[in-house]
Amino acid sequence: MVLGYEDDKLETKYPAFRNLVREYKEGILLFDLTQDEVWDKASQDSAGIFNHYEEIKSQFMWNDRLAYTYWVCEDVKVAKKISKWVSKEKLDKLNDLLGAENPLSIAVQSGTSQQKDDDVLSVLWNTSTGVYGPVSLTGGFGVIQVIDFMPSGPKALNEVKGLVIASYQDKLEQAWVKNLTAKFEVIVDDSVKKELFNTLD
């Protein structure tokens, strides 16, 4: 009972504790409001996300790219067969060949590459789509299929969705703060401000 009484009087007897409790409660309130007005709204508003992406997509641009598949193997004969079957679009023959070989002796990589001077694929930028190789590499042979050349353009929404949502959250937060500022007058208590600054010194 005594402990309960003392507990009820903590905020009255100890101003620092009272301020800490108030700060905690206000922090929880601000967190809940921000979650409702900004975070949840941004993540759940698919139309808003798309419209915001359309507004800012010029910030997320690809350079010129090429799409490719790249095979590296130890045996030049295997590399020549890969080049032959890919050139003739005989995917069944290619799959049979890859299935018959030791999987550790052949590496395959597919993807896109932006133009860079130091990129191993940079020599292909002045070519056309097609199959190139075998070319001699350190410890093996390479075959490259250039599938497509893609001009510079904005990245797709699914490629930058996290960044777009973060930007959309910032936009919603700024609009929310602006709306609150228009509705409610901001009053600064100079004496409290001075006291606070003194405690920081």
Image: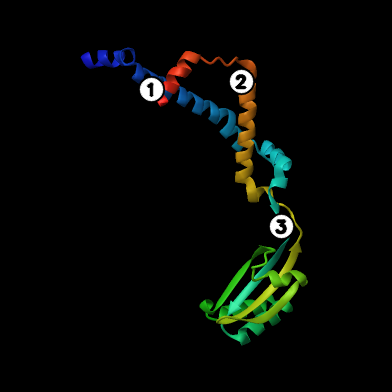
Name the residue rendered at 41%, 26% in the picture: 200
Q: Earlier in the sequence, mark 3 or mark 2?
A: 3
Q: Which residue is mark 1?
A: 20
Work out whether residue 1 can be spotted. Answer: no
Q: Residue at x 58, y 80 (%)?
A: 73
Q: Amino acid at mark 1?
A: Leu
x and y percent of residue 30 in the render? 50, 25
Lateral position of residue 151 relative to residue 171, left or right: right
- The quarter of the displayed image where residue 186 is located: top right
The reply to whether discs 3 and 1 touch (Cβ–Cβ < 8 Å) is: no
x and y percent of residue 183 in the render?
63, 16
Front residue of 52 and 178? 178
Q: Quadrant of the C terminus?
A: top left
Type of the residue with mark 3: Asn
**Label 2 amino acid?**
Leu
Q: Could you tell me which secondary element the residue under label 2 belongs to? A: helix
Quarter of the figure with residue 100:
bottom right
Whichever of labels 3 and 1 marks the residue nearer the N terminus, that label is 1
- Return the x and y of residue 96 as percentages of the image width and height: 61, 79
- Mark closer to the chain start, 1 or 2: 1
C-alpha gap between disc 1 and disc 2? 25 Å
Mark 3 crowd level (few <14, some 14–19, many ≥20, 10 Å Cα): some
According to the image, label 3 marks what residue? 63
Near mark 1 (Cα within 10 A), the count class, few <14, some 14-19 or many ≥20, is few
Residue 111 placement, left or right of 28: right
On screen, residue 12 above or below 197: above
Farthest-out residue, left: 2
For the residue labelled by badge 1, is the local secondary structure a helix, a strand or a loop? helix
